[in-house]
Image (cartoon, grey):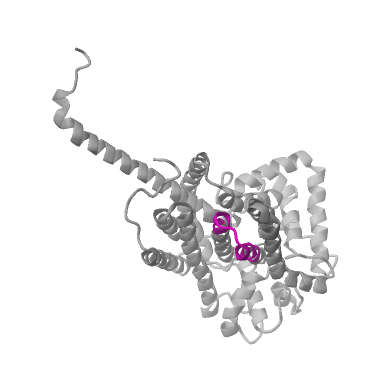
Amino acid sequence: MSAAAIDWNVARPAQRTFRGWLAGIATVGLALRILYTFTISPALAPISDDSFYYYASNLIAQGHGYAQPFTYFFQGRLTPTAGHPPLWPLVLAVVSLFTAPASGVGSLTGTAVDVHRIVGCLFGAGTVALVGILGRRIGGWRVGLVAAAVAAVYPHFITLDGYLLAEPLYGFLVGALLIVAYDFGARPSRWRSFALGVLVGLAALTRQEALLFIPVLVVPLAWRAGPKRVVHGGLALLGTLVVVTPWTIRNYVVFHRFVPVANTTGAVIAGANCRATYYGSDLGSWQPSCTVTPVFSSNEAVESSRRVSQGIDYAGRHPARATLIAGIRLLRIWSLYAPNDEAIGNLTVLWIGMVLYWSLLVAAIAGLVLMARAGRPLVVLVAAPIVTSIAAIVGDGLDRLRYGAEVPLLALAAWTLVWLYGRAVRSHRVGRLARVVIAPHRDALPDARR
């Protein structure tokens, strides 16, 4: 059986049947996420990224715009922010329109925050469905359903989806981006080019490293599109600009500096390049203590630039160590060094998930090798892991930032599992046929010893 043909000759389900199974798997995934979130998931931390998103969404719903919630919480001052990309708090603000308090940032306990956490679970279930669709694109309906089933029970997704972090939305957008990219690779068209750019822009407004999809994914796809490569590339870039530019203009008006998406770069670079992360037990990690320095400006963008300089200056004074730490960050993001070191969630579930992840990683790598040997295009499947790896090398190796890269990883792992199953079925059938045909005539076979 060749690596290029996974679906052996069996009756294939109708599109409606596939969708029905996929919807059922996604529903099971949603139930598992809600069950975990409201039973064994640890409580939300009052000062953290997830509480930032929740508090900020309430302030947006109250009409204060995208304001720094911790400054308002501690000092009572409303100051504009780009401390995180805006799309996730804006999505949560739709729920906050019905649940936000009349004033203040709200509380991390009660029905209001629970409803917000369910939003993350819904996006997680949507990601399950998109993983299934991507699996079908690359290997047929069997791969699609297996990929969706794995994503539905995948602990790393389940533990993150019930928090108020941006990862579920980012994974959903990456899944949609890869499906459109795969379709574009098969049948380039102008609307697919523009849709690629729009999805890159939306993903960037969720996690700004998604802008790397332009050189890593969009440019190679456009180049392969033939004589119209410039048109396709231009439309994709236009789609990204249409989505991101209004926010960039807002940031320039507020901070008087060019801030494409967010002011997180300073905190990331400073927190990843300091003595605490270069030496000792926290090699290659990100430490908030490294970002706690005197604030010289009330302008968030100015402070971010200063902290970028702080982190780059430290790395420049320790070049050999910086190279080593960059490699360790790369190992960290793929959980090949200090696994679960900075993970959030129930520890037992996390370690079960880690063992499953390592197994699926091996299967995904095997799938890449087999598909490469069969001459299958791989740019769509490797784009998200490359983007994630670059972001980790530059700044942070937190394994939760791997979420988007695991969307194609699970599809690839499912491809390998179905391929192995197909080989086993074929071997069994061939062996059974040999026994049926040869066994009755064994006595009539020539004896080689004669």
Foreground of the two, 126 or 46: 126
Q: Quadrant of the C terminus?
A: top left
The residue positioned 28% from the left and 37% from the top of the image is 430
Foreground of the two, 187 or 210: 187
Residue 39 in magenta? Answer: no
Residue pushed farthest front? 227
Compared to 211, does 1 lie above or below?
Answer: above
Foreground of the two, 272 or 199: 199
Foreground of the two, 45 or 271: 271
Place of residue 73 in the rendered image (x, y in percent of width and height, measured from the top left)? 70, 76
From the viewer's perspective, tell me whether residue 129 is left or right of residue 306.
left
Q: Which residues are magenta?
A: 182-198
The mark total stands at: 0
Is any atom of residue 48 visible in this view? no
From the viewer's perspective, tell me whether residue 239 is left or right of residue 156.
right
Residue pushed farthest top? 450
The residue positioned 69% from the left and 44% from the top of the image is 325
From the viewer's perspective, tell me whether residue 431 is left or right of residue 83.
left
Place of residue 8 in the rendered image (x, y in percent of width and height, measured from the top left)? 36, 48
Res 91 quadrant in image? bottom right
Residue 185 in magenta? Answer: yes
Overall secondary structure of the magenta stretch? helix
Place of residue 381 in the rendered image (x, y in percent of width and height, measured from the top left)? 55, 51
Res 98 quadrant in image? bottom right
Is any atom of residue 146 visible in this view? yes
The residue positioned 64% from the left and 82% from the top of the image is 61
Compared to 441, does 233 lie above or below?
Answer: below
Q: Quadrant of the N terminus?
A: top left
The residue positioned 52% from the left and 60% from the top of the image is 345
Residue pushed farthest bottom? 102
